[in-house]
Image: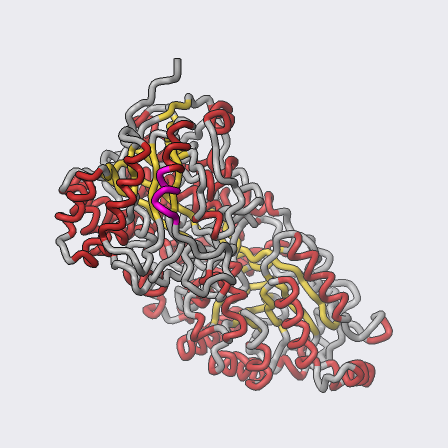
Amino acid sequence: MAQAGPGTVSAVDPRELLGVPLAELRTEARARRTSVHGTRMTYSPKVFIPLTQLCRDRCGYCTFAQPPARLQAPYLSPEEVLAIAEAGAEAGCHEALFTLGEAPEDRYPVARAWLAERGHDSTISYLAEMCGLVRDRTGLLPHANAGALGGDELARLRAVTASQGMMLESLDDTLACHRLAPDKTPARRLATLEAAGARGVPFTTGLLVGIGDSRPDRIRTLSAIAAAHRRFGHVQEVIVQNFLPKPGTAMAGEPACAEEELWWTIAVARLVLPPEVHLQAPPNLADDLVALAGSGIDDWGGVSPVTADHVNPERAWPALAVLTEATEAAGYCLAPRLTIYPEFAAEPDRWLHPDMRFSVLDRADAEGLARDHPWCAGGTTEPPGLLAPPPGRRSGTGGAVGEVLDGVALGQEPGEEELTVLFGARGPEVRDVCALADDLRRRAVGDVVTFVANRNINYTNVCTFKCRFCAFSKGPLSLNLRGAPYLLELGDITERVKEAEEAGATEVCLQGGIHPSFDGNYYLEVIGAVRAASDRIHIHGFTALEVTEGARRLGVPLGEYLRTLKEAGLATLPGTAAEILDDEVRAVLCPDKIDTEEWLEAHRTAHGVGLRSNITIMFGSIERPRSWARHLVCTRDLQKETGGFTEFVPLPFVHMAAPIYLQHRSRRGPTFREALLMHAVGRIAYTGLVDNVQVSWVKMGTEGVAQALLAGANDLGGTLMDENISRAAGASHGQEMDEEAFRAVTAPLGRPLAQRTTLYGRVPAPC
């Protein structure tokens, strides 16, 4: 064992583990687990749907299977299935676990008749219908635990499930408990495991420990699972479940699996299985959760807030608060997951039937884990309370997140890898990231929260570019989308500027689509229309795309064009059109738009002629945290070069009316945890370079803004008279805020409010 460090499982002959002391096995298993999975411990919020308790097998330990006389009906009806699933969805579950006996129609005429009356020739046929019903009516992701199946049956279920499973249990073919269970023969179970791999089914399997099996038997079973996974890569997780005797069964008088035996099996499983395979132990079957977590598992399995464990109904699920406390006591952070694990969800073409891909995407966060709260950017649901005043202090989180935070506290600059780690923070790690960001904010700009009085003028929503996330821009035939195509008259722009200045605005923000009739002179005409109304108001306008396209259409160098705009009155550029500065992502989101280097060059050139600008990021649609980190790093590098950026502005993707979401090709925006971390990690990434971090009240809502102000943000952006772009995408937080509304957010935090100019000077209070 001394030579078998984390990640070198292939160097260990599994038979050698039989002679290793338990304490040493557990230590090595924990190290192996941490080297791959870090501090994260997952669980699946699920609802159990016992489709039928009839079964042709008679296992010596089972109380789930019942004869027809003890059941009201052979199968749950569609209405009963849907009622259970709807209760689960309402309670925040993501998974619908279908549990059922194996092939009861082969044993019970009543089962055959019930199925035939409803047009089904098998339990699997009815199961497939119910999985589809639950998916389509509730959005829950079905997981079918249907036992030993053939390849065609697995393929049929693959179209309506996100994953499937079957416990291998043991390869010992002499176990008395399986004597009357034809589906529990090792050969039949192994054939199902192989068939699942051949058909690309994300699969769960596992061992049942203490049913007469021996330690060498378990090593043999684990080795067979490992071999199948190495052939197909399909084993998501392995469950190590301890036997508990139940009254009324043939094994009622047998001893329960000893804790040490369970811990031994978990530790050995961690060392025998390929390192990427997840390892699970049911928390409701153990009395010491901290010790269980310390044996090498990285997942608690399914935990239901709605239904009992129908296989072990005498053992209640631990409350989520209890599970969280035990997880953190063991040194880990709890995170909800989907029934399909992130590494499988990340390859939908390989692991998911086309009919299941959007169902998974719609419930996933940026890492492929489960969305942990129903909040969405621009929506009406209040966010979860992740942060509360007074500002927190770091709790001393360990693991990779803690190491990065310690380095930042010592003055080290986090790179792409470190920033990606911070975006993966969960539980207490999130609070520690935000606490450090808040401290950095205090050192950089103090406690004052700023805002600018401004008006948005979106002069046209007609655009020749086809950004797939944009619900604002319209082509000539886009009347089916929110709002009709329009182009403001220059006189309308002048009038709006007059109204804005009379209302106290110090800035107008000018943005619009790339109209097919525009050339570079149009933007000069817009500036002229603004100056016709006011020679004082700050003109903040024209994205990198607009100025690049304007210069191109005039056939002049970008620098020359920007100087002309500046001389006409343009003062600063917005950072929009950045979206995600990662060309792999841009190729999907905005394939005909400027690429990353062109966006950077536009701002580099603007800074060179004396025009300052800001950094934006639109996040939460299709990209992953590494792309966020790349965005922060490349803009930080440009800031080191030019010093021209005034602020960082995270813009959470608003999905409701976005074309890419309506086409089932994106997530529903970031989770609130992700949105909060974007502000905090941005503050950390730009330390000493960009002092201001702005939070968008249009997208985050006032409750979200309050928490962002505890996570490194110091600016509320603009009052935004006539904000149209977020509203076109479905945001519901209104068109305008005023000073009193902003103060209602900042006052409970004990933070003073001040009006600023676009360049962060102070606007004197009115006399």
Write down the quadrant of residue 84 in the picture.
bottom right
- Residue bounds of the magenta highlight: 488-494
Asked if 62 appears above or below 500 in the picture, the reply is: below
Q: State the residue in front, 150 or 15.
A: 150
* Residue farthest front in this picture: 491
Residue 506, horizontal then vertical, whole percent: 34, 29
Residue 59, horizontal then vertical, whole percent: 70, 75
Residue 205 in view, yes or no: no
Asked if 382 appears above or below 714 in the picture, the reply is: below
Q: State the residue in front, 189 or 753.
A: 753
Q: Say if the magenta span includes residue 504.
A: no
Q: State the residue in front, 215 or 556.
A: 556
* Residue farthest top in this picture: 767
Q: Residue at x 50, y 31 (%)?
A: 388
Q: State the residue in front, 137 or 511.
A: 511
* Residue farthest right in this picture: 69
Residue 551, horizontal then vertical, whole percent: 19, 54
Left or right of 273, for residue 603: left
Q: Residue at x 45, y 41 (%)?
A: 722
Q: Main secondary structure of the magenta part?
A: helix
Write down the quadrant of residue 591 in the picture.
bottom left
The color scheme shown is secondary structure
Left or right of 97, for residue 64: right
Q: Residue at x 63, y 68 (%)?
A: 136
Residue 407, horizontal then vertical, whole percent: 27, 39
Question: Where is the N terminus found, in terms of image quarters?
Answer: bottom left
Residue 11 in view, yes or no: yes
Q: Residue at x 53, y 71 (%)?
A: 356
Question: Where is the C terminus found, in terms of image quarters?
Answer: top left
